[in-house]
Image (cartoon, rainbow, N blue to C red):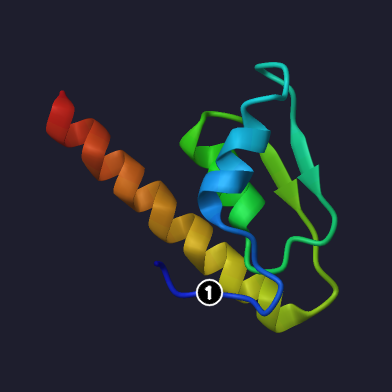
Amino acid sequence: MAQKRHAEGKPIYVMEALVQLVTPGRTIVDPYMGSGTTLVAALRHGYPAIGIDIKRTYFDDACAWVEEEWQALQEQGAASA
C-alpha cells in the first residue's frame, strides 16, 4: 500500500474512479485539496483541475506531487512515441 501523504488522504484508485464519473472536458475543482490526490487523479485521466488549500504546506506538497506526476506522464508519453 502506498504511503499516505495527508492524514485524511484518500486512496488514489478511489479518486480516479470518481474523476471518471465527470463529463469529459469539465474542470474538476477541489477546494480542500490536501495532498492533491484529486488533482493527480484528474491529471492521470486528462481532466483540467484546480486545487485550493488554506494550509501552505499542503498546497506546496500537492503541487510537488502534481509536478512529479506530470513529469512521469511526459516520460511515459515520450517512451511510447
Q: Point out residue 42 in the picture as x, y percentages from the top left corner.
A: 59, 39
Looking at the rendering, which quadrant does residue 41 occupy?
Answer: top right
Q: Nearer the viewer, residue 41 or 63?
A: 41
Q: Residue at x 55, y 75 (%)?
A: 5
Quarter placement of the C terminus: top left
What is the x, y in percent for residue 24?
65, 17
Q: Is residue 1 above or below residue 14?
A: below
Tell me which amino acid carries mark 1. Lys
Identify whether 9 is placed above or below 22. Answer: below
Query: Would residue 31 appear left or right of 28 to someone viewing this image?
Result: right
Residue drawn 34% across the image and 51% down it: 71
Q: Quadrant of residue 35?
A: bottom right
Which of 14 and 42 lies nearest the eye of the viewer? 14
- State the residue lying farthest toward the top: 24
In the rendered view, tell whether residue 26 sits above or below residue 77: above
Query: What SS does tag 1 mark?
Result: loop
What is the quadrant of the N terminus in the image? bottom left
**Mark 1 — residue?**
4
Instruction: Identify which residue is drawn at 34% across, 42% down.
Output: 73
| Residue positioned 31% across, 40% down in the render | 74
Q: Is residue 40 visible?
A: yes
